[in-house]
Amino acid sequence: MLAPVAAVVRAFVRVASPAVPIYALGDRVPSIARDAYVHPEATVIGDVRLGPRSSVWPGAVLRGDYGTVVVGEASNVQDGAVLHATAELPTVLGSSVVVGHLAHLEGATVADRALIGVGSVVLHRTEIGEGATVGAGAVVTNGMKVPARALALGVPATVRLDRSDPEIIELMAQVYVDNARHYREALRRLG
């Protein structure tokens, strides 16, 4: 079983190192666009789908063991972030989404050009609207909806309407697309 899985993964993924921890779990096999970037110290397991120009950074864990994790085009999952899904609830990121360091998302849907701040938690059945921002350290509780262009802050998060700028978030996403290109070309392990 491992040989065919390895062939499938190689057909989709182009990574900085052959040692990148990308795992199939039974018949759940990651699908990774050829121009996506997965750092060698990130972990991708099971039914995880990485779109074109997306990136996953050191220490991030994307675990599609029970359900599906989708990362859209030009989106990034930064250092130490955790994306997980349940059997009933996928975790889905749209395009040009920025997921900050140490964020945790599970069973959530995040629309295009949204930002999930450093150390925030976004829980089951949440919907983060297009161009919305979840502030650093915020906890978006089960079933909460953050409207487009809104800002969610605090524990539990409260919403402030029309306080986020999707154009700035898209620029932030592009920084990571460019950084992934640089890492793909220049990263090398020493020692």
Image: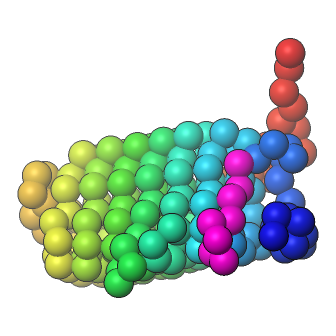
User: Height in image: 171 above or below 15?
Assistant: below
Which color mode does the image show?
A: rainbow
Query: What is the x, y in percent for residue 189?
Result: 84, 27
Q: Provide the residue span drawn in magenta.
A: 21-28
Q: Residue at x 17, y 71 (%)?
A: 142
Q: Is residue 157 left or right of residue 30?
A: left
Screen quadrant of the C terminus: top right
Prevailing secondary structure of the magenta residues: loop
Screen quadrant of the N terminus: bottom right
Does residue 168 appear in this view?
A: no
User: Height in image: 6 above or below 184?
Assistant: below
Q: Residue at x 40, y 43 (%)?
A: 102
Quarter-of-image position of residue 58: top right
Q: Residue at x 25, y 66 (%)?
A: 123
Q: Is residue 137 left or right of residue 177?
A: left
Query: What is the x, y in percent for residue 155?
Result: 11, 52
- As drawn, the residue found furthest toward the front would be 1
| Magenta residue check for 50 | no
Q: Residue at x 19, y 56 (%)?
A: 139
Does residue 157 appear in this view?
A: yes
Front one among 72 and 178: 72
